[in-house]
């Protein structure tokens, strides 16, 4: 019994692409990855192309680097002078130096020293792709309108400078300057990025020079302030010492010496000696500051001069291309996952079984037929009209009897014979859900295959709305099924095969639209099939598509079996299921499904290991 596969208790989780198991189906994931691999690779290659285009359009930037050491190992006298006996925490101090290098105090001095405020090559240089695009647009606009209003256009579209060119130049410096502490060391690294390698080197060296000069200036100011304060203190101590000496002399001259006055005198002499000692100590410190006035008191010095950047540091070609390729691959993977999620077409026999409960009678590869040149032959009166095949695809099995297509037609014959045992004339309908799925081509080849087995066969084109078979087998023929259903049947309307026991009744070709009476297919079709009952072993009916017209509902009562043709990878599974559910009589008579236009190279990607389709490639030697 090949009509249907028993499937009443089917777990929906077995549907390919719709597994609901708690465990991860690694085999399904790998199969999906194989199916989408080409798409992901295309996206990755697209990312590579975009990366190359980006590298071609992006502005190359050169990075110059210098390093400055903040040295705390100064001589004791310098440390005493600079720190004035206080303890400085190094971490906040290093962060303060970083902010100082970034400050406008240093930046504006660099601007003034290098004349950047008036350097148009510096002010207008593009530092990124966006800047480059803006500059290109501006240049295009200038060139476009420059012929009429060149001077005013230049003023209007020049790079905005702002109210202060120095501040604009400093803004560019600040955007492209990087200052950071090197680890936990006392070294600061200063980086500057520029489209010009020479400009980058000049700016970073100037930053180091001005920073050290600023440190020297600041230290000189501190020493000057400290010396001024020390001088004031020294003058005060000198006065106090002189006053103490004068007080001793006055006391000696004004008082006679006795035990009481001697004690007072001794106290005055001790106080004078103490003040004199303090004065001498301050005088020594002051003299020391004078001696160290010429010392380089700064704690900072350059430990690594900026070398000339010979090659651009940004963008990095390898890293940029790797990022674009990875991003392209990620996008491709995401879109591929969406494509897999939206995959709702018939790809395998397992999907046919699980969705429809029907057996797959065959998988027919896509056939690219060619037009057949016809020779004009004069037909004598009384001779039967012969079938004239217009395209080689419509008699493929006749010329390729060992092909996959022919084998699928033989499988359909076996299924029909098993299903309809005991019937003298078997009426088989070939139907599809949508137009263009290939039912007419399969009807023609199935009828030829039956005739090749010496079976008397009648092929009827029953699609009276849009016949697809008649133009390929009876081009220009004006009479056919429509006339037969109106009771105007003439045996000469049937075309014959030149060598096989095959007859063909075309559908309506031209005069269908000029018929004066409406066609009543139900009763007349029954009468026609009854008239054919004793003359043919098989009657193959090429039916209209199920979805757009209602003719199939009329014809299905007269059919013994139906074969459903589904286009591989094109017709949605849910749509086919719903269509059959709405035509229960036809569904009950359906003995199986033919998957048409199958891509035999891709089908292995849609099946699990061990399935019939997985080993499809090993059967090629049987199809010659």
Image: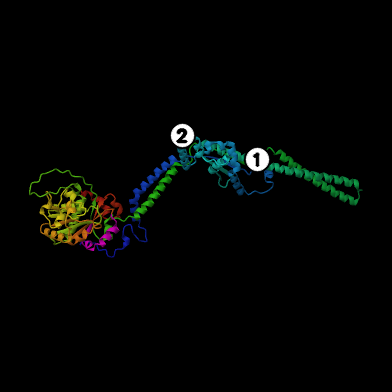
Q: Which residue is mark 1?
A: 217
Which residue is nearer to you in this view: 501 or 419? 501
Which residue is nearer to you in this view: 491 or 394? 491
User: Is 416 drawn above or below residue 293 in the view shown?
Assistant: below
Residue 391, horizontal then vertical, whole percent: 19, 47
Residue 392, horizontal then vertical, whole percent: 19, 47
Q: On the picture, is 262 further left or further right than 192?
A: right
Residue 38, horizontal then vertical, whole percent: 34, 48
Q: On the picture, is 365 further left or further right than 95?
A: left
Magenta part of the chain: 571-593
* Res. 257 mark: none
User: Is 597 drawn above or below residue 151 in the view shown?
Assistant: below
* Res. 147 mark: 2
Which element carries disc 1, helix, strand or loop? helix
Which circle, 1 or 2, is nearer the viewer? 2
Residue 62 seen in the current view: no
Which quarter of the figure is the N terminus placed in? bottom left
The numbered mark, 1 or 2, whose residue comes first in the sequence reads 2
Residue 586 seen in the current view: yes
Residue 52, horizontal then vertical, whole percent: 41, 41
């Amino acid at each position: 019994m090949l009509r249907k596969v028993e499937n009443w208790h089917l777990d929906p989780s077995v549907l390919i692409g719709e597994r609901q198991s708690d465990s991860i189906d690694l085999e399904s994931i790998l199969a999906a990855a194989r199916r989408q691999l080409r798409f992901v690779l295309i996206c990755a290659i697209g990312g590579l192309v975009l990366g190359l285009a980006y590298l071609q359009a992006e502005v190359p930037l050169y990075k110059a680097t210098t390093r400055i050491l903040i040295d705390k190992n100064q001589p004791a006298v310098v440390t005493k002078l600079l720190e004035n006996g206080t303890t400085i925490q190094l971490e906040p101090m290093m962060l303060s130096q970083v902010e100082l290098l970034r400050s406008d105090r240093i930046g504006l001095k660099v601007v003034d020293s290098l004349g950047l405020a008036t350097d148009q090559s510096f002010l207008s240089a593009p530092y990124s792709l966006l800047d480059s695009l803006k500059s290109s647009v501006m240049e295009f606009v200038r060139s476009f309108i420059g012929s009429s209003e060149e001077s005013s256009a230049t003023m209007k579209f020049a790079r905005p400078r702002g109210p202060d060119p120095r501040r604009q130049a400093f803004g560019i410096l600040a955007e492209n300057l990087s200052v950071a502490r090197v680890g936990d060391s006392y070294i600061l690294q200063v980086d500057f990025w520029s489209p010009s390698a020479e400009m980058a080197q000049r700016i970073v060296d100037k930053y180091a020079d001005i920073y050290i000069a600023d440190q020297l200036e600041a230290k000189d100011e501190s020493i000057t302030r400290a010396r001024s304060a020390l001088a004031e203190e020294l003058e005060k101590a000198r006065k106090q010492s002189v006053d103490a000496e004068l007080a001793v002399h006055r006391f000696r001259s004004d008082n006679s010496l006795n035990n009481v006055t001697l004690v007072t005198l001794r106290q005055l002499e001790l106080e004078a000696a103490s003040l004199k000692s303090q004065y001498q100590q301050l005088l020594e410190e002051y003299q020391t500051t004078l001696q160290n006035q010429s010392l380089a008191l700064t704690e900072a010095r350059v430990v690594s001069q900026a070398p000339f950047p010979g090659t651009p540091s940004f963008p990095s070609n390898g890293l940029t291309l790797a990022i674009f390729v990875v991003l392209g691959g990620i996008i491709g993977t995401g879109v591929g996952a969406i494509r897999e999620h939206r995959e709702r077409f018939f790809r395998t026999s397992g999907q046919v079984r699980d969705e429809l409960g029907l057996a797959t009678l065959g998988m027919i590869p896509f056939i690219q037929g060619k037009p057949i040149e016809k020779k004009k032959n004069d037909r004598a009166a009384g001779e039967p009209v012969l079938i004239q095949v217009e395209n080689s695809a419509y008699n493929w099995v006749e010329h390729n009897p060992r092909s996959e297509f022919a084998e699928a037609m033989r499988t359909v014959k076996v299924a029909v014979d098993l299903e309809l045992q005991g019937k003298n004339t078997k009426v088989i309908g070939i139907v599809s859900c949508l137009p263009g799925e290939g039912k007419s081509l399969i009807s023609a080849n199935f009828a030829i295959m039956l005739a090749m087995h010496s079976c008397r066969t009648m092929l009827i084109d029953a699609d009276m709305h849009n016949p697809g078979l008649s133009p390929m087998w009876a081009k220009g023929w004006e009479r056919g099924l429509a006339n037969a259903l109106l009771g105007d049947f003439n045996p000469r309307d049937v075309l014959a095969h030149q060598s096989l026991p095959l007859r063909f009744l075309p559908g309506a070709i031209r005069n269908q639209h000029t018929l004066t009476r409406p066609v009543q297919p139900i009763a007349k079709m029954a009468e026609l099939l009854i008239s054919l009952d004793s003359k043919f072993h098989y009657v193959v009916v090429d039916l209209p598509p199920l979805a757009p017209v209602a003719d199939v509902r009329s014809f299905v009562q007269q059919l013994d079996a139906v074969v459903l043709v589904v286009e591989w990878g094109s017709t949605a599974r849910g749509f086919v299921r719903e269509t059959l559910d709405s035509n229960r009589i036809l569904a009950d008579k359906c003995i199986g499904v033919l998957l048409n236009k199958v891509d035999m190279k891709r089908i292995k990607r849609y099946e699990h290991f061990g399935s019939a389709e997985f080993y499809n490639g090993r059967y090629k030697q049987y199809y010659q």
